[in-house]
Image (spheres, rainbow, N blue to C red):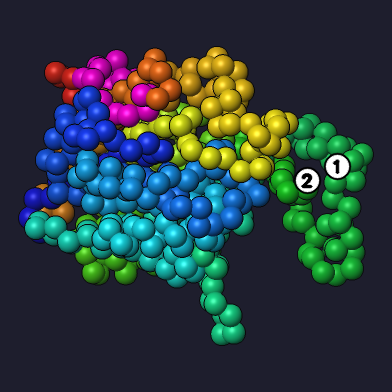
Amino acid sequence: MKKMTLIATGDAFITRRFPEGGYEGFEQVRDVISQYDVKFSNLEMTFHNEEGYPAAFSGGTWAMADPRTLDDMRSFGFNLFNTANNHSCDYSHGGVLATIRNLEERDMIFAGTGKNLSEASKPCYLETKNGRVAMIAVSSSFHESGMAGGQSAELIGRPGLNPLRYETIYHVTEENYKKAEELAALTKINATMERSVKNGYKNPPASGTLPFGTYKFVLDEKDWIESVPFPADMERVEKEIIEAKKQADIVLVSFHGHETDGEDTTVPSMFLETFSRRCVDAGADAVIGHGPHELRGIEIYHGAPIFYSLGNFLFETETVEKQPYDAYINKKMPLDTKVGAYMDARSKNGTAGYGVLPEIWLSVMAGWTMEDGHLTEIKLYPISLGMTEKRPQKGVPVLTGDENVLSYLAELSKPYGTEMEIKDGVGTIRL
């Protein structure tokens, strides 16, 4: 394989059209992206004209944009897209299928959603002058109603996203285990499960394991939290990677995951680390993470880059055009409330939420080079999304050369043994 260059960005929550010729700073971002063969972004949005019913559960904001905003995304030069995330099914099955149709009409190459589980799980393929690239995409952050369903001998499958489910196990000392037992007995939280065991429908829990509703406590010598990928989902992804490795020169995996096992949102859950490393073990050449709307560390695992989160690339949540009944009812607001007033109330007039968190509005674009199938270096380009801009202007990326952002990312990456050189406003990781 020839030399291959790739660049990836984080979440693109786009709700506004670009002005003719692009916004101020657009050209500089586009010019960096255009230097690379493979250009990836996460489409954290549904693209249609009210062609799906608003779902009972959303990813936070019911995300729907004019399909023409896809043309604005393409104007950056992107040629590879993820569609599996916690907003994929904000407008139910109709929104999923309409988004797919609008992508396909524009010949946009994407993975992560489909009209059934088989389609949502399969790799997409991008042809470049320097080689063929495959990508598999999953999301661990979603409501269960958004999962794509498989086909049976009798019935068609269900539109949705490619799921990465997981289990969290709470290891606790004997003292805390007894407290959990006492609380379970007091609240009768396990009554349904215990009745099923008594009637022979379920097996009793293993010794030293305490179900607590949907949670699981395990007796251990110390208190700690373990999270593991759901075996069926992990194995499905591994099989797709193995197949893609036979059909492409480079295999990428994209995951959308907000989860953390503790209070520090910059640290990914254990299951996301396990998932990413197992993907590399199965043959993936890079794993691209996004989801928590902020940066997480970079790991080089067996010569492959794992970006645990590339933060935001576009973040225009407050200028979404419409919100459904559920949004206003959830906030106890009149149904004739307009979106602008709704956003004012949700953000407490710009004093709370994502709008006042600097880490949400600073990010990087990550570009890397592969020669003969091996990673040689990673370049990191800091961007800002304009936290201090007014609502109609904020949320679009501009290059900054901000070395403080690079130093921050370098610190997040240190636990993985990753070292970064910072010079002239660009970070470099060399192998």
**In which image quadrant can residue 303 be found?**
top left
* Element class at badge 1: helix
Residue 200 at x, y percent in the picture = 85, 70
Query: In this image, 267 relative to 123: left or right?
Result: right
Label pair 2/1, CB-CB below 8 angstroms: yes
For residue 184, the mark is 1
Q: In the image, is residue 315 part of the stretch drawn in magenta?
A: no
Q: Is residue 228 visible?
A: no
The one of 65 and 159 positioned closer to us in this rendering: 65
Please state which amino acid type lies under the numbered disc 2: Phe
Q: Is residue 424 visible?
A: yes
Q: Residue at coordinates 66% horizontally, 43% vertically from top-left?
A: 325
Q: Residue at coordinates 52% horizontally, 61% vertically from top-left?
A: 94
Residue 69 at x, y percent in the picture = 34, 44
Q: In the image, is residue 403 part of the stretch drawn in magenta?
A: yes
The one of 191 and 327 positioned closer to us in this rendering: 327
Q: Residues within 10 Å of mark 2 (few under 14, many from 20)?
A: some
Query: In this image, 324 relative to 207: left or right?
Result: left
Segment tinted magenta in the rendering: 393-408
Q: Residue at coordinates 29% horizontally, 66% vertically from top-left?
A: 244
Q: Residue at coordinates 42% horizontally, 51% vertically from top-left?
A: 47
The residue at the far bottom in this view is 153
Q: In the image, is residue 396 above or below residue 258?
A: above
* Element class at badge 2: strand
- What is the quadrant of the C terminus in the image? top left
For residue 245, the mark is none
Residue that mark 2 sits on: 212
Of callouts 2 and 1, the N-terminal one: 1
Residue 245 at x, y percent in the picture = 26, 65
Q: In the image, is residue 211 above or below residue 171?
A: below
The one of 429 and 84 positioned closer to us in this rendering: 84
